Amino acid sequence: MNVTVQSIKFNADQKLIDFIKRKTAKLEQFLDNIIEGVCYLRLENVEDEANKIVELKFNIPGTQLFAKAQAKSFEEATDVAVESLRRQINKHKTKTRTAVSNHKELLSSEEEF
């Protein structure tokens, strides 16, 4: 899986980029057919300390998953966004499994007639 990291209006250092790629690579444990991923890093001009925003967008066959997190550090926001994507992947897998199993049940019941 290829993950592109884009920092908007600032330069992200290599350690942060490596951290993001390492965290997002773990998502392949849950879904192995992820096509690509894009990570956007932004600093928001607010007075709050939690001004770092991470947006993750992953393309998988049939749909696109998106997560956005805001925190005090990019690492913390990345952890929250990756966890959100993991939950979305599990939900997507459950839906597709249910659809396939229902389809198989319909086919087997039609054969009985």
Image (tube, rainbow, N blue to C red):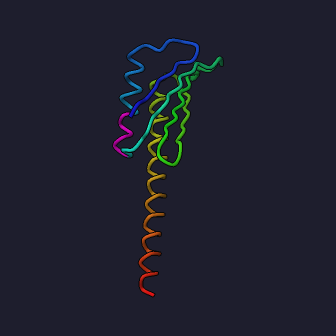
The C terminus sits in image quarter? bottom left
Dominant secondary structure of the residues highlighted in magenta in the image: helix
Q: In the picture provided, is 39 more to the left or to the right than 2?
A: right
Q: In the picture provided, is 23 more to the left or to the right than 102?
A: left
For the point 46% across and 27% down, which residue is it? 76
Please identify the residue farthest to the left as the structure is shown.
Answer: 29
For the point 35% across and 37% down, which residue is it? 26
For the point 54% across and 37% down, which residue is it? 67
Q: Is residue 107 above or below residue 59?
A: below
Is residue 32 or residue 44 the one in the foreground?
A: 32
Please identify the residue farthest to the right as the structure is shown.
Answer: 46
Span highlighted in magenta in the image: 25-30
For the point 49% across and 46% down, which residue is it? 88
Q: Return the x and y of residue 73 as percentages of the image width and height.
A: 49, 22
> Image quarter for residue 14?
top left
Q: Is residue 34 magenta?
A: no
Is residue 46 or residue 23 the one in the foreground?
A: 23
Is residue 74 or residue 29 the one in the foreground?
A: 29
Q: Return the x and y of residue 64 as percentages of the image width and height.
A: 53, 42
Please identify the residue farthest to the bottom as the structure is shown.
Answer: 113
The N terminus sits in image quarter? top left
Q: Is residue 26 magenta?
A: yes
> Image quarter for residue 23?
top left
Q: Return the x and y of residue 8 as percentages of the image width and height.
A: 57, 18
